[in-house]
Amino acid sequence: MSLIGIRVVSIPVTDQEKAKQFYVEQLGFELVTDNPFQMFGKQFRWIEVAPHGAYTTISLTNWFPDLKPLTGLVLNTNDVNNDYELLKSRGIPFSAPPTDSHSGGGRVAFFSDPDGNRWNLTQDDGRE
């Protein structure tokens, strides 16, 4: 097999502009693409964002009405406490301050985007 990684993960959103603002302005992701396209005879927007330098991106999709909010999305950081404070100051709603991970091996803080997609902000403890 020649598989090398996950390129794009689609995250369901109801308002693409509001979601783009959240991911770019509040979370600090880079805007990779914001282009119109046609599908099923309708006009849509392909909006793709990613953390700086990341290979995997997320697309903010609203054309699959049966998609439910995702849980268990993991965003890795080198300093969960600092990033928690920064993101909280930008209005990102965390459920609690960072705590030791229940799975062992690091610290984690949880937040949701405006559409209820749940993220884990995680700092590994360096174990292999």
Image (tube, rainbow, N blue to C red):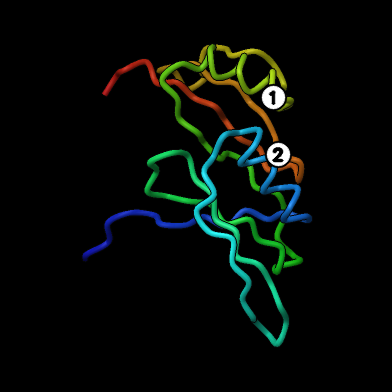
Label 1, residues with CA under 10 Å away: few <14, some 14-19, many ≥20: some
Residue position for label 2: 113
Q: Say what amino acid the circle numbered 2 marks.
A: Asp
- Residue 78: image quadrant is top left
| Viewer-closest of 36 and 68 | 36
- The quadrant in which residue 25 appears is top right
**Tag 1 or tag 2, which sits nearer the N-term?**
1
**Amino acid type shown at disc 1:** Arg
**On screen, residue 120 above or below 84:** below
Q: Residue at x 70, y 68 (%)?
A: 64
Position of the C terminus by quadrant: top left
**The N terminus, quarter of image:** bottom left
Q: Do the residues labelled 2 and 1 touch (CB within 8 Å)?
A: no
Q: Residues within 10 Å of mark 2 (few under 14, many from 20)?
A: some
Question: Which residue is at 69% across, 16% downward?
Answer: 96
**Which residue is located at x 54 percent, y 40 percent?**
29
- Indicate the position of residue 72 as horizontal and vertical percent values: 58, 39
Does residue 112 lie above or below 43 as drawn? above
Determine whether 39 is above or below 31 in the image: below
Residue carrying label 1:
90
On the picture, is 12 further left or further right than 28?
right
